[in-house]
Every structure is written in C-alpha cells, then in structure tokens.
Image: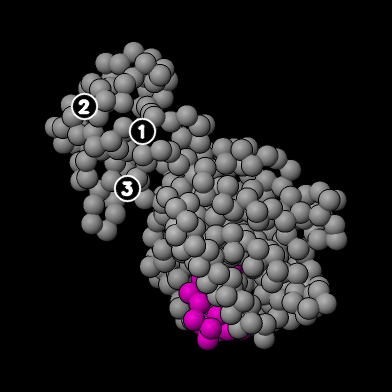
Amino acid sequence: MILILEADLAEQSPVFQQLLTRLKAMSDIQYRIHQEQGVEQLLSEIYLIGNTKSLRVEDMEALPGVKQAIRVSKEYRMLGRYSGDHRSQGFDYNGVHFGQDNLNVFAGLCAVDTPEHVEQMMKALQENGQVCTRMGAYKPRTSPYAFQGHGQACLPYVFELAGKYGMRVIAMEILHESHMDEIREALEKTGHPTGVMLQIGTRNTQNFELLKAVGRQTEFPVLLKRGFGITLEESLNAAEYLASEGNTKVVFGLRGMKTNLGDPHRNFVDFAQVPTVKRLTRMPVCIDPSHSVGSRDAGPDGIPDVFHATAEGVVAGANMVLVDFHPDPATALVDGPQALLLKELPWFLEDVRLARETYEERVLLAAAQGVAE
C-alpha cells in the first residue's frame, strides 16, 4: 500500500511524526519513506510493506497527514500505475521534462572516440535544435579484446563540449558504481556544464548490486534498458530495484530481444510493448532502434530500417529515442555499421516529428471514441 501525504509535510513536523508513531504500532507492517523536493512543493510518499491486506483504505486515509491511500497489487509497487493513482508520471532534470506525454531524442555517439567527432556531433545537434545526446564513455563488450571505451579520460572534454553546444542531458552507460564517482568528479571540475542520465545496459539489467547502488543516489536520473533474454516483468522488477532504493526518476528502455527470430536485424524489435509499459507503470518509455536493427540497410522505398523501427515506436507513444549517429561510421570504434550519418540527422528528426504528430492525432481520435482515460 502507498500513502501519499499532504504537500510540504516535512518529516520533522509533529503531524509526520504522529503518523510514523501510528505506523510503528501496526503489527507485521514495515514502511519506507520517499520524499522529493520539487520546484514548488515537497512531495512525500510512504510505502507500506508486509501484511497490508488487512488494512482498509478508508482507515489509512484517516491517519494524520495522509492525502490518499493506494492499494498495490503488483510487485513493481513504486513505479506501477494503479486505479485512482493521480501521482505525476514523469520528472524534470536539468531543464528537460521526461514524461509519458512528451518525446525527447538522444542522438549521438555509441562510443566516444575523438574530441573532434564529439564536437562535430554536438554542433550538428545544436544546429538542429536538440538539447540531448548520447555519449558512451564506458562500453561493455562481448570480447575482452574489443574497445572498452575511453572511460574517465574522455569525460572532461565531453562535458565541456556539451556546455559549449547547449546539450542539457547526456545519456551515458555505466558498468560499475565507481563510474558514478568519476562522472561526479568530472562534472564538478568542469563546472557542471551539462547533466547526465545514467544508463544501465541490457547486460546489467539483473546486476542487482549495481541497481541498488544507482538507486541509492538521486542526483542522476536513470535509463534502464530491458534485459535482452528475460521477460518484460523481470525487467520491470529491475526498474523497481532502482525505485525501492530511492530513485524514481527512471526511464524504461526497449532495445530489442536477442533471438534468431529477428534476423536479419540484430535483435527482434519489441517496440509494440511501448503502450504495455506505459499502461503498467508511470515510467516514460525509451526506444533504441539502432541496437534493435543493427545496420544502416534501407528497404526498396529508400527508407532505412532504423527509421522504420523508430517510427513504429514513436507512433506507439514512445517518450524517448536513443539513436546512434557518427561523423564517420567507417572509423567508429563501436557499432559503426548501425550509425547514421550526420547529413541524415535533419531527415531523421523530421521523420520522428511526423511519427509523433501521427501519434498525437491517434490520441485525439481515441479520445473522440471514448477510449482514452
């Protein structure tokens, strides 16, 4: 069960302490407190754990300071969507809104290779009105002999260039909790010119100790990619690990499933589950067409498969697109064959705009039919 408290109710206040005293007196019930300071209000929620079936919603809503009680029936209790749940469905970070009602594009380098390529990428993004990008500093690779990323060494120039070209948020995968410290240190030394969204890759979706460590910090939001060989429910529970430790600023990423049924694409595209994730949870949903398709191949219509996969996800209501571009894919150190060209960026963004416009028209059509909430 979730208790949503009155706004601006500080934990040190008499009402809050009176509520905690009442909760402590309940047998077989434990609780976790989650507080988030918004721009205008302090928002507080208490998650009740244990034998909550015997608790009546009406009784809990009568407790001091409680605005609403929500009965939870799913395992992903903190990020799930429930009947009568009017909590916000997104968050703001460094001037960018992430929610189930908007769309952000994160185009950039799968792996940072040279400062020149980083600058070319960010300059092209700025010229096309973008404020978000992806930049891979730490790269998990199947082969121990493959390029593992420049790591900490590239962070200062990546952040400085992001500030120069107005990039507000960089999606950056981490492989170990120590990488968070390296990112923090580099941001501090460069004067915080940008923000970072920590990315948990598909290989680490069930690295539970990493999930707990990332969840314990609330400075950075998190993009959690679905595990390529596990069920959707298992991946949603991985996101719940982050939230249960305190970080509810989570975006859920679909990046394709590992199966030969998807051939000749790199992975089986799973973007039809965008509305499923949005229905089950309050998380914004990201699609990664580059790692789903894995190539720059185009169909007889001249449209690259990456564009088609992107449109599929955006038309289904995706809220974020993570896509690979590179100034010179032939020299890319990671995933060059799937990287789009900088000259294709305006085309890609316009294609995304058309797909998003179609989705918004579909929402209006559903509302007219009385289908939408």
Tag 3: residue type? Glu
Query: Please, is residue 6 above or below residue 182 in the view?
Result: above
Secondary structure under the numbered disc 1 in the rendered image: strand
Q: Which label sits on residue 36? A: 3
Q: Which residue is drawn at 25% across and 29% down?
A: 61
**Range shown magenta:** 119-137
Residue 187 appears left or right of 206: left
Q: Residue at x 31, y 43 (%)?
A: 35
Tag 2: residue type? Leu
Is the C-beta separation of discs 1 and 3 under 8 Å?
Answer: no
Using the numbered discs, state the Cα–Cα distance from disc 1 to disc 2 in whole angstroms: 14 Å
Mark 1 — residue? 70
Query: Please, is residue 260 above or below residue 138 in the view?
Result: above
Mark 2 — residue? 63
Question: Which mark is in front, 1 or 3?
Answer: 1
Q: Compare residues 143 and 205 and report the one nearer the observer.
A: 205
Tag 1: residue type? Ile
Badge 3 crowding class, 10 Å Cα cut-off, few under 14, some 14 to 19, many 20 or more, is some
